[in-house]
Amino acid sequence: MIPSPGAHGGDGERVARALGIDVLDLSASLNPAAPDPRPVLARHLDAVGRYPDPSRATAALADAIGVDRSRLLLTNGGAEAIALVSSELGGHVDEPEFGLLPRDNAGPRWRSNPNNPTGRLAEAAEMAGVWDEAFYPLATGQWTRGDPAVVVVGSLTKLFACPGLRLGYILADDIEPFARRQPHWSVGGVAAAAIPDFLATADLAAWAARIAALRDQLRALLSPFAPQPADANWLLCADAAGLRDRLAPHGVLVRDCASFGLPGYARVAVPDEAGLERLEAALRRLG
């Protein structure tokens, strides 16, 4: 039996255990151009022996983004960034939208940019009170859209393809209300110690260009499933009913989009070249 899809994708390990096979997880949209994070982490394993101090990591990330350090708060993944901001401000969305964003029918408008699940970047004139820019660097080659007087939440674990590490951030003119809500030692020591080295490997423009090229190849493979125009590191397929369950026994997992209110749609992450070959082989076996 193929396990039912979770609410947010990233089910590859669970499906692999259930089926007893290796699975390429294209239900989680990570950076296919990121270097292997393990050598970086290996240099900082001694950080497990002391309480974390995120000050150096905060300074390094603020300098990379080009903002004052007082405007930046590191978080335990993008999920904590969203939780801290939504608990302080509330908020609402226009569907379809990422499931962790608040739906209070009050407070500021939130908008993921590019939109998750459609993969489309917001128009220049579109406004939001809170931007979720978890995938913005991978779509544009730039850290942030830079709207004044808004709050931004972001994710380094998407950017550096290490979702198990949990690294996110909040950008705001006044970060203190969110910092007061954050537990002590929220960001782990190994993660905080590794951030400057991760940032030294970042080439946002080159990564975005490579993702765009890989996305074009992915679109060709997925042409029978009506892939929609996208700017992100995934494609949303409009004619993909049952595709998740059909592909999983062949070792490839895609994101069922019923949780977005889009039954019959699938979201497929852009893989690297080896992943494209593996997906092509699986699709061939489907006939």
Image: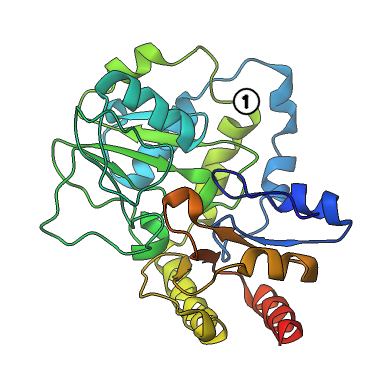
Give the residue at the far right of this rendering: 20
Residue 12 placement (x, y as % from top left): 71, 53
Determine the image quadrant of residue 208.
bottom left
Residue 280 placement (x, y as % from top left): 68, 83
Determine the image quadrant of residue 249.
bottom right
> Looking at this view, is 167 or 250 the one in front?
250
Label 1 sits on a secondary structure element that is: helix
Q: Is residue 255 left or right of residue 279?
A: left
Q: Is residue 167 left or right of residue 65?
A: right
> Looking at this view, is 176 or 109 the one in front?
109
The colour scheme applied to this rendered structure is rainbow
Q: Is residue 165 above or below residue 207?
A: above
Q: Is residue 272 above or below residue 255?
A: below
Residue 50 placement (x, y as % from top left): 68, 16
Q: Residue at x 19, y 27 (%)?
A: 107
Alpha-carbon neighbours of circle 1 within 10 Å: few (<14), some, or many (≥20)?
Answer: many
Please state which amino acid type lies under the numbered disc 1. Answer: Gly
Residue 287 placement (x, y as % from top left): 71, 88
How many numbered discs sit on the rendered protein?
1
Q: Quadrant of the N terminus?
A: bottom right
Q: Is residue 278 above or below residue 128?
A: below
> Looking at this view, is 124 or 148 the one in front?
124
Q: Residue at x 36, y 17 (%)?
A: 179
Q: Residue at x 25, y 23 (%)?
A: 89
Q: Is residue 242 above or below residue 89?
A: below
Q: State the residue position of label 1.
A: 189
